[in-house]
Amino acid sequence: MKKAGGLRAIFAVPLLLATVSIAGLVVALTGDGWRDAASWAALAIPVFAVGWAMRTRRT
């Protein structure tokens, strides 16, 4: 059997979601104004990803 992508394919999306989450938290802690909106957007991405995964998993 051949592996389908290896470690890079397995951990690419979780690493991206973790990076976006950490960036959103740092931006939220460092300023106000437009940074609040950017942090909300960055922290909403993992929530939408989980919702999308749950929806596609059911069908």
Image: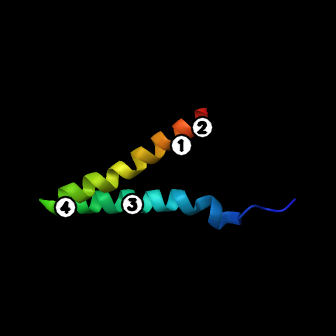
> Where is residue 54 drawn, in percent x and y?
53, 37
Q: Amino acid at mark 1?
A: Ala
- Helix, strand or loop at mark 2: helix
Q: Amino acid at mark 2?
A: Arg
Q: Give the residue at x 71% y 64%.
A: 5
Side of 48 relative to 24 (left or right): right
Residue beneath label 4, please? 35
Which image quadrant is residue 1 in? bottom right
Q: Residue furthest left?
A: 33
Residue beneath label 2, please? 57
Q: Amino acid at mark 4?
A: Arg
Q: CA distance from mark 4 to mark 2?
A: 34 Å
Q: CA distance from mark 1 to mark 4?
A: 28 Å
Q: Amino acid at mark 3?
A: Val
The answer to which of marks 4 and 2 sits earlier in the sequence is: 4
Residue beneath label 3, please? 20
